[in-house]
Image (cartoon, rainbow, N blue to C red):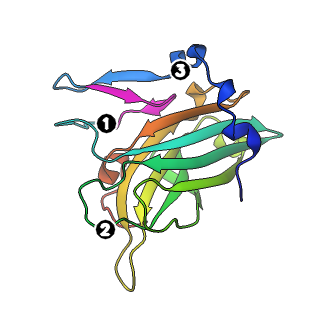
């Protein structure tokens, strides 16, 4: 599914939107820019700058539906020789429970994939919960898909009555509460 034009129009972004972005300091004093509503993983200790890339997402509440636009990602697997085949999975999170999985199609052979897909959740299921966003590398044959990074967004911290588009820093998959880097 293609992204509706309203999610591609950058004119809705302004300096006023910056108040929704967060800057966090890691324990060793590194500055880290988080996307609007993004939750820093518990106990995460960054040794150097971001290494897992970023994902660009758009959020909008429309007619009782939370629309999550997975627009693109950048700087994925910068140290690997081969360019990965990737897709994005999202889950609603209620405490420790993961609910209602959605995922994008696989984008092949790029470190900067363009997903341009809308994932929809019923607003009564989504509001008051967090959204987990996880980037996965699709493997061939019997190999398990590999988690490349993820982010968590507190939906209550977003101004969902209007379009909200931002870049979200990806963290190691295991910091999001899964015990493995294999696809759940």
Q: Position of residue 146 (x, y in %)?
A: 35, 66
State which mark lies toward you, 2 or 1. Answer: 2
Give the quadrant of residue 5.
Answer: top right
**Residue 34 placement, left or right of 93:** left
157 over 3 or under it: above or below: above
State yes or no: residue 120 in magenta. no
- Residue drawn at 19 percent across, 22 percent down: 29
- Residue drawn at 33 percent across, 44 percent down: 171
Q: Secondary structure at mark 1?
A: loop
Between 107 and 58, which is closer to the camera in this rendering? 107
Q: Which residue in the protein does label 2 denote?
A: 82
Q: Residues within 10 Å of mark 3 (few under 14, many from 20)?
A: some
Q: Quick one: quadrant of the C terminus?
A: bottom left
Between 81 and 153, which is closer to the camera in this rendering? 81
Q: Residues within 10 Å of mark 1 (few under 14, many from 20)?
A: few
N-terminal-most mark, 1 or 3: 3
Residues drawn in magenta: 31-41
Q: Which residue in the protein does label 3 denote?
A: 20
Q: Which residue in the protein does label 1 denote?
A: 42
Q: CA distance from mark 2 to mark 1?
A: 31 Å
- Residue drawn at 38 percent across, 27 percent down: 33
């Amino acid at each position: 599914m293609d992204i509706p034009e309203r999610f591609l129009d950058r004119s809705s972004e302004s300096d006023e939107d910056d108040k929704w972005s967060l800057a966090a300091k890691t324990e060793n004093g590194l500055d880290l820019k988080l996307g609007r509503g993004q939750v820093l993983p518990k106990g995460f200790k960054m040794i150097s700058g971001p290494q897992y890339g970023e994902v660009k997402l758009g959020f909008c509440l429309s007619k009782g539906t939370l629309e999550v636009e997975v627009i693109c990602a950048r700087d994925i697997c910068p140290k690997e020789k081969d360019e990965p085949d990737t897709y994005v999975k999202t889950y609603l999170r209620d405490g420790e429970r993961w609910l209602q999985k959605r995922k994008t199609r696989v984008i092949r052979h790029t470190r900067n994939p363009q997903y341009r897909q809308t994932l929809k959740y019923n607003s009564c299921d989504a509001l008051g919960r967090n959204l987990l966003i996880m980037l996965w590398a699709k493997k061939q044959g019997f190999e398990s898909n590999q988690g490349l990074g993820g982010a968590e967004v507190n939906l209550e911290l977003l101004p969902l009555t209007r379009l909200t588009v931002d870049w979200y820093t990806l963290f190691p998959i295991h910091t999001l509460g899964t015990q493995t880097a294999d696809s759940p």
